[in-house]
Image (cartoon, rainbow, N blue to C red):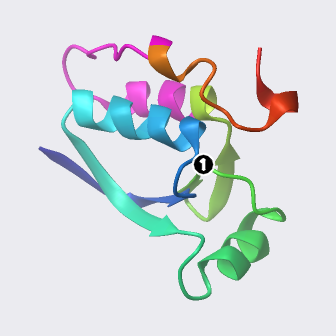
Amino acid sequence: MTMFDDLILYELPGCPFCAKVDRFLKENDLEVERRMITEGTNREDLIAIGGKKQCPCLIIDGKALYESDDIIDYLRTRVEGEVKEADFSDLKNACPVPWAQG
């Protein structure tokens, strides 16, 4: 397992985009510090760092990176060796928010 001590991932329970990042991490045996925005002051902390409460959000050197695909693309650059591609097909239409589907 590879642990990235310099990264923090903010997540929202039940979020399919967060699940996508989680699946990539698991498939590639990667670990980052995780913070649920529903716990403690994590939501306020995320807003203070990135200006919005959007999840998933990966904090890199104190800067916010949003969007699951962008986060996965960044993580690919940090993987040593061959990157395992996760199957996300079951998550494609999992978002309960109508404007986010498709």
Q: Nearer the viewer, residue 41 or 72?
A: 41
Picture residue at 39% right of the left edge, 40% below the top: 22
Displayed quadrant of residue 2 = top left
Eyeballing the image, is 90 above or below 35? above
8 falls in the magenta region: no
In the structure shown, which secondary structural element does the residue marked by tag 1 occupy?
A: loop
Residue at 66% in and 46% down: 65
Q: Quarter of the image holding residue 93?
A: top right
Q: Among all residues in the image, which is located at the extreme right?
A: 99
Relative to 100, is 82 above or below? above
Residue type at tag 1? Pro
Task: Return the residue found at the far left.
Answer: 1
Q: Position of residue 81 (x, y in %)?
A: 19, 19
- The front one of 10 and 5 is 10
User: Looking at the rendering, in which quadrant would you find the C terminus?
Assistant: top right
**Residue beneath the point at 72% across and 81% down:** 44
Question: In this figure, what is the number of numbered marks?
Answer: 1
Q: Is residue 84 magenta?
A: yes
Left or right side of 69 for 64: right
- Asked if 82 appears above or below 26 in the picture, the reply is above
Q: Which residue is mark 1?
A: 56
Q: How would you rate the neighbour count of disc 1 (Cα within 10 Å): few for under 14, some for 14-19, many for 20 or more?
A: many
Start-end of magenta stretch: 71-89
The N terminus lies in quadrant:
top left
| x 69%, y 44%: residue | 66
Q: Is residue 94 above or below residue 9?
A: above
65 to the left or right of 76: right
Give residue 91's position: percent from left, percent from top: 52, 23
Q: Is residue 41 left or right of residue 97?
A: left
